[in-house]
Amino acid sequence: MSLPRAFASDNTAPVHPRVLEMLAAVNHGYAPAYGDDVYSEQVRDWFVEQFGEGTAAFLVWNGTGANVVALRAMTRPFHAVLCAEQAHVNVDECGAPELMTGCKLIGLPSADAKLTPDQIHGAVRRIGDEHAAQPRVVALAQSTEYGTVYTRDEMAAICDTSHELGLLVFVDGARIANAAASLDLPFRAFTRDVGVDMLSFGASKNGAMGAEAVVMFDAAHAVEMKFLRKQSAQLASKARYVAAQFLALAAGDLWHANAHNANAMARRLADGVRGVGGVHITQAVEASAVFATLPRSAIERLQRDFHFYVWNELTDEVRWMTNWATSAEDIDDFVAAIRALSS
């Protein structure tokens, strides 16, 4: 069944044609399994180009798997992970990080899904107390679940504070391409260069069929990662098909074009509904999401023709997501429908 024009999630978007072409291109003959193929090697080289020498990248199936494998590598079961209360690892992964790491996730309140150094300072308590889970990792999302983006300086300040307190920094990069396009910076400038220890790198939300990676810069973590990936059911046997998707997005910086379009369409949508009666944009529009409140009756009417989620049932806050395939016509039709309801 085809959905009406969708603003619910970037996961509802089709696979980019160039990704499908690359999947077909690698689908001939035999190739070594489990990542020993030439395509996987090319992807690992691409990650080194993006993040620098000493980078190790491990391809995985999906975003939750990437986050879980990374957090397993950074923690022991008596540790705690500090994150924004809205973080995907905290509210949208069915408890998988806690189940598979044994750690306690501590969600910190945030109006924009971003953490601050002061919050981290305040949350690091009872160090050495055997009765309390010990803070070990600060988990950030870039871009965040509210579509907001940490600046390079904000990331640097959090990393500096975390390291001073003996904590590691992990970035959930399911939408890292959107953040890079928004900041107009290379990936490493707001991750490795400012002190991020490990990250997940998403492609599925940016035109791939299903491809993510765990990226790290510490050789000690890399030694264990292949075992953790296998144990976490994230090792692809026919890895060339995961690698092919990254190769397609890397070619000609397709990843950037896709993310740039998603971000631009979100801005177009936000600009189109500003000033419309009853519509209030609740978050800064910095990546590929628009959050807004509007009357319940308007939400119900719009959902007959457009697919999107109500983010907060109590406040009638909705989330409108754009993606690589969202067109200006899609946005303009949606804006016209919203405006028609307010007239």
Image (spheres, helix red, strand yellow):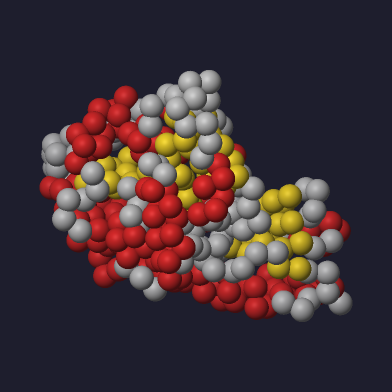
Is residue 238 shown above or below 191? above
The quadrant in which the C terminus is found is bottom right
Question: Residue 309 location, x and y as percent?
Answer: 68, 52
Q: Identify the residue shown where x is 55% and y is 72%.
A: 265
User: Which residue is nearer to you in this view: 96 or 105?
Assistant: 105
Residue 275 in which image quadrant: bottom right
Residue 206 in which image quadrant: bottom left
Q: Is residue 103 visible?
A: no
Q: Is residue 154 left or right of residue 188?
A: right
Q: Is residue 267 visible?
A: yes
Residue at the far top: name it.
Answer: 131
Question: Residue 155 location, x and y as percent?
Answer: 43, 59
Q: Identify the residue shown where x is 53% and y is 20%.
A: 131
Q: Identify the residue shown where x is 14% and y is 42%.
A: 37
The total of numbered circles placed on residues is: 0
Q: Is residue 239 left or right of residue 340?
A: left
User: Which residue is nearer to you in this view: 293 or 296?
Assistant: 293
Q: Is residue 277 left or right of residue 141?
A: right
Is residue 50 shown above or below 163? below
Question: Residue 8 location, x and y as percent?
Answer: 62, 55
Q: Identify the residue shown where x is 33% and y is 40%.
A: 60
Question: Residue 282 location, x and y as percent?
Answer: 70, 64
